[in-house]
Each structure stands twice: as C-alpha cells, then as structure tokens.
Image (spheres, grey):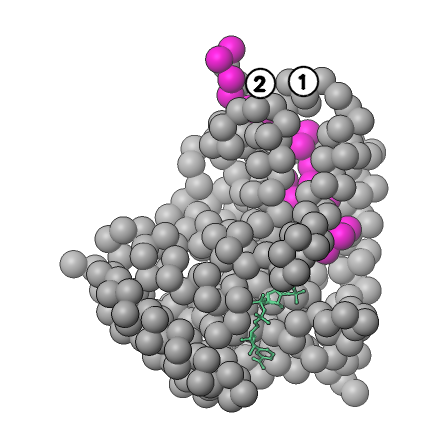
Amino acid sequence: PKDAVRILVTGAAGKIGYALTPMIARGIMLGPDQPVILHLLDIQPVAESLKGVRMELIDAAFPLLQGILATTDVNEACKGVNIAVMVGGFPCKEGMERRDVMHKNAPIFKAQASALEQHAAPDCKILVVANPANTNALILKEFAPSIPVKNITCLTRLDHNRALSHISERLNVDVRDVKNVIIWGNHSSTQYPDANYATATTDSGEKSVRELVADDHWIDSEYINSVRERGAEIIKARKLSSALSAASAACDHVHDWIIGTAKGTWVSMGLYSDGSYGIQPDIIYSFPVTCQKGEWSIVQGLKINEFSREKMDASMKELTREQSLAYSCLNQ
Ligand code: NDP
C-alpha cells in the first residue's frame, strides 16, 4: 500500500472547505488508491465548527482517510504537508473594495508563507484558492523564498471548467468531448476565456469550436461575459458564493498537476510567469499548461491575435496594479 499523503486545507470550516474535504477523503483529488491524512486549519472564532467538520469526516468512515489533524495553530497545521490548499481568507463583504480585501489577506498569506516554509515537506505543492487568488499566491511566493516557485499556483480551474461547460451546453455535446479552452490572466472580471483553440468531438470527428458554433459574436462576446459573470450569477441565485464547484475545481487542479493531463489536452493554472506570451515575468498569471509527473509546463507556440493580445494585456495590467497594492498593504 502507498504511504499517506498529508494535505493541508486552510479555511476548512468554511463553505468551500466543507465541500472540499470529503472530496479529498474520497479519493477525488489523488485517486482511489492513495491514502490521505487531512490537516484542517481555521481560526479561533470557528474552532468549534472545525471540530464539527472533523467529527463528520470521521463519521463518514472514508476508507482512504488515515488521519485528521484539526487545529487553529498554523505551524502545527503545516507540519510535513505534501500538498497545501489555501482556501481560508477574509471574504469580500458587501461594500468592501478589492483594496480592503487585500489589506486583510496580505498579512494572512505572509504569515502562512513562513509557516509553510518552515514546516511543510520539502517538495510541498501549493494551490491558492482564497481571493484575490493570484496576488495571495504572489505574497506566498515572496515570503517563502525557499519553496520553489514552480510549486506555487492559484486556482483558475473553476473558470476553465465553466468555459468547457458553457461550450458543451451551446453545442449540445458532452462536456468531456470539449477541450483546450484557456483562461488567461487574473481570477477576476478581467480574466480572458479564450476559445480560439478549443475543439469539440461530435459524430463527425474533432472540430474547432469556433467553426462548430458558427457565431463569432457568441465566442468573442457572450461566451466571454457569461464565463466571467457566472460567479455573480450563482451568488444571486444561491445568496451564497459557489462552493461545490470551487471545491471540485480545486480537486481537478491538484489531480491533473500530480497525476498528469490527458494526451493532447491542456488545463488552465495560475503560475509565476516566466515571460511566455509576453506576460510580465514577476506576476502570477493564468496560462494553459500540460502536466506530467507532478510538473507543469506552459503550452507554447499558440498564435495570439490582436483581439486576444488586448485582453491578455488588460488582465496583466490589473495584476501588476494589484501586486503593488498588496506590497503597499504589507509595508504600512
Ligand atoms: P468560502 O469557503 O466560500 O471561500 C473561501 C475563499 O475562497 C474566499 O476568499 C473566496 O473568495 C475564495 N474563492 C475563490 N474562488 C472562489 C469561487 N469560485 N467561489 C467562491 N469562493 C471562491 O468562504 P467562507 O467564508 O465560507 O470560509 C472562509 C474560511 O476562512 C472560514 O472558515 C474562515 O474562518 C477562514 N478565515 C481564515 C482567516 C485566516 O486564516 N486568518 C481569515 C478569515 C477567514 P471571495 O470572498 O471573493 O468569494
């Protein structure tokens, strides 16, 4: 039998945490033959609720779940973890501006970076979910200099999955038959859902989505807006933000990173830019990637037209502004 993998979930008593932890314990993240030990972290005010989550996880008797550590001590929580899913963060409440959220979250990520650096397993892989996800990931990178930058990522997979499912609904094909959409940029309203390389497999074989949809206005406008606005639509309907789809996307992200992407298929991940596609090299930006043996690599050589360039750059500019805002929050 395989050794158990230790997985940290921060904000574990929150809504995403409640959906995510049973998925991990059931083997959705790392596969049906990989035992796991969950490290659950949350803050003191919700310590009782965290205990409740722990009890429920025990009661579910998940065969793969070999242990649960539930704690409000960040150093204890990070000890020996192989994977860290950073969900905990101060939520964007009504009337709050992005600047206010940054003020709350920048110091949290600074502290968690130090704890991970000191206590996590040497090759720990990190996925940041809490918003602003790209910038929180950048702060984490800044304050955990000994963690390889390739191990620090943020979630844009929910946007990627939404993009796939929007196309699947439009074309009336199974979602598994749609592939290679891209989310470029920030996990925010400036993200660019790009369907230019997407394909769908129908009875007549694999074809370009643009060709199958045969409506450029839909691809270049409606589709982009509906992917960008889906989160707000869910909040309107549920009076709560998306949690099960965010948790499922977090599992997909880590699963594909560690187990690998299918041949000929890519996914979107927020990564420390290496300058590919003219994106400034010191920000966390979402790119198309393939993964193999626990390593991602950015898909290279895609032709970028003027329309895409403009949208990719707009999101890059937003991220550089966010980054300097975050640094100014930390220096105050
Ligand atoms: P959720 O579990 O719903 O969300 C957690 C974080 O994920 C938020 O920052 C949220 O951003 C973000 N997020 C990213 N993508 C998505 C998405 N697609 N849909 C929804 N959310 C997304 O929040 P809860 O308030 O239920 O739980 C947060 C937990 O964090 C609580 O248990 C709380 O105690 C803990 N916490 C920890 C802190 C710390 O460690 N110091 C500080 C504050 C809270 P957004 O708000 O923009 O939706």
Residue 211's tag is 1
Q: Name the mark on residue 271.
A: none
Residue 318, relative to residue 256: is it above or below?
A: below
Q: Residue 76: where, in percent of width, then height?
A: 40, 85
Give the left or right position of residue 73, taking residue 235 as reference.
left
The residue depicted at 52 percent of the width and 71 percent of the height is 14
Which quadrant is the N terminus positioned in?
bottom left
Judging depth in this view, the residue of 49 and 201 nearest the camera is 49
Q: Depth check: 50 or 117 in front? A: 50
In the drawing, does residue 15 fall left or right of residue 240?
A: left
Q: Residue at x 41, y 45 (%)?
A: 260
Residue 264 pos. (x, y %): 48, 31
Tell which of 234 and 176 is nearer to you: 234
Asked whether residue 203 is drawn in magenta, I would say yes
Q: Is residue 136 magenta?
A: no
- The residue at the far left in this view is 1
Q: Residue 149, percent across and down?
A: 55, 64
Answer left or right for 78 relative to 267.
left
At 71% from the left and 18% from the top, the residue drawn is 214
- Along the viewing direction, whichever of 19 and 212 lies nearer the viewer: 19
Q: Secondary structure at mark 2?
A: strand
- The boundaries of the magenta stretch are 182-204
Q: Quadrant of ligand 1?
A: bottom right
Note whether 332 is above or below 279 in the view shown. Answer: below
User: Does residue 163 appear in this view?
Assistant: yes
Q: Which mark is residue 207?
A: 2
Instruction: Answer few, some or many: residues within 10 Å of disc 2's Cα (few below 14, many 20 plus, some between 14 and 19).
Output: some
Q: Is residue 149 visible to us here? A: no
Amino acid type at circle 2 is Lys
